[in-house]
Amino acid sequence: MTKTKRPVTKAILIAAFLLTLGFLFGRPAVSEAAEKPYMIKVNKQKNCVTVYEKDEKGKYTVPVKAMICSGGSDTPVGTFNTLNKYRWQLMVEDVWSQYATRITGSILFHSVWYYYRDPSTLSARQYNNLGKTVSHGCIRLTCEDAKWIYDNCPLGTKVIIYNSSIDGPLGRPEAIKLPLSTGWDPTDTTNKSNPWNDKKPTISGAKNTTVKYGAKVDLKKGVTAKSTTGFGITSDIKVKGKVDTKSPGKYKITYSVTDLLGRTAKKTVTWTVEDNRYIPVISGVGAKAYIDGDTELTKDVALEGVTATIDGKKVAASKIKVTIKEKKEDIYTVTYSVTGPKGQVTKKTSTFYIDREAPELFGVMDLYMGSKELKQYLKDGNLEEFMMEGITAEDNLSKMSPARIFPEWSYEADDIILCTYTVSDDAGNTTEATCRIYLDGAEERADADKSPEEQPGGKEKQPES
């Protein structure tokens, strides 16, 4: 038993006394049978119990049942024969167990312990430890497994406790996990008050579904499952049935899941594959489109970049019906419509804007740079980044970003670089602006080469008299 914080009381002393009397003089709850139908082996290392029955030669070699258990470091290794049985047994530390069968001394098979002699006071935390080495030496079992030994293995049944890294011939079962808020063992099904008796696993997300012809389907997508006690077991879901999306029709799909209590949930749904091979598909239609002010919105203009297919085959542009309606000045609603061979109609709508204004560029101005600085920019390959510092664009309709501005440069003279900026909006309206980068005083030299009237504040030279 795991240590609890319950105080030492007279009940503990009485329990110890009764435990000793039970060991010495305990009366069997079930009469000893002349023939022992089973032998029990306990793999202490793997916390696994295996029950064997006799073969044709009368040897216990046929494994018939496996149980998960929790032993302890004080669990003895060796061969024993069961001695006594107790429907309820008071244990050390003033706790109780159900369906206890004494193996040797103070070592018993028994259910996970209860705080009181009450089946609703189970320690759920200790139940969730089944499979771990946590007891004081006894072999803890689920209530169902402890009862099975109590009911089916008469006193004198041989018990072999050993250590091995191999679970056993039937493997080691797992115990269902419990929420800590419960005080009931869900395997205690003979108790009519057990609230787990009328519960079972649940399947969620399985529903009637319609898919298109040729689509890829994942029958388990979105489908989940929980155990009787509310823990996820989605990975255990099994699916019966298939959906052939190349064959239109209805398909019955059954989902099922079984938890560690052996309880099963099932749900059957219908998957429908539509015969949509001949439904037209229109591509290339955006929610918005722009054309410049010099372009007339015609069917050919509206169809630029728009295509249609039926069953994967391209539809001629002449088969695409285009309806153009003016919503208000320079704004039009364009509807595209294609009719399939079986009368199926597909429509898509877009709004066209006639953009009569080109974008504006801001921040374009002459710059100054030293020759050494220029060489470094050219070496690093980032002269364009320098040119773009402080440059922005705006438009009346299209969204502008620096990525839409394209800078270019070239030598206008040995010490003057001509910078050109180009930006276009969604309608194709383009704006271009230029500036210069003067190297090492090139601007002053350029001013010196100008005629007097061209120089800042200069005057025209007067002829001599």
Image: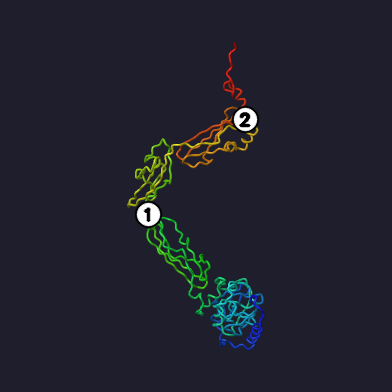
Q: Which three-letter amino acid code belongs to the residue tagged 1?
A: Asn
Residue 439 badge: 2
Q: How many marks?
A: 2
- Give the x, y percent position of residue 185: 55, 76
* Above-or-below relation of 330 to 268: above
Whole-angstrom CA distance, mark 1 to mark 2, is 68 Å
- Give the x, y percent position of residue 14: 65, 85
Residue shown at 45% from the left, 64% from the top: 206
Of 376 and 441, which appears nearest the observer?
A: 441
Q: Quadrant of the N terminus?
A: bottom right
- Give the x, y percent position of residue 302: 39, 42
Between disc 1 and disc 2, the foreground one is 2
- Determine the image quadrant of residue 446: top right
Label pair 1/2, CB-CB below 8 angstroms: no
Horizontal side of residue 249 vs 439, given as left or right: left
Q: Residues within 10 Å of mark 2 (few under 14, many from 20)?
A: some
Horizontal side of residue 54 vs 214, given as left or right: right
- Give the x, y percent position of residue 18: 64, 86
Q: Which three-letter amino acid code belongs to the residue tagged 2?
A: Leu
- Determine the image quadrant of residue 85: bottom right
Q: Earlier in the sequence, mark 1 or mark 2?
A: 1
Of 86 and 74, which appears nearest the observer?
A: 86
In terms of secondary structure, where does tag 2 sit?
A: strand
In terms of secondary structure, where does tag 1 sit?
A: loop
Of 3 and 80, which appears nearest the observer?
A: 3
Of 215 and 113, which appears nearest the observer?
A: 113
Colour scheme of the rendered structure:
rainbow
Horizontal side of residue 139 vs 261, given as left or right: right
Q: Quadrant of the C terminus?
A: top right
Residue 276 badge: 1
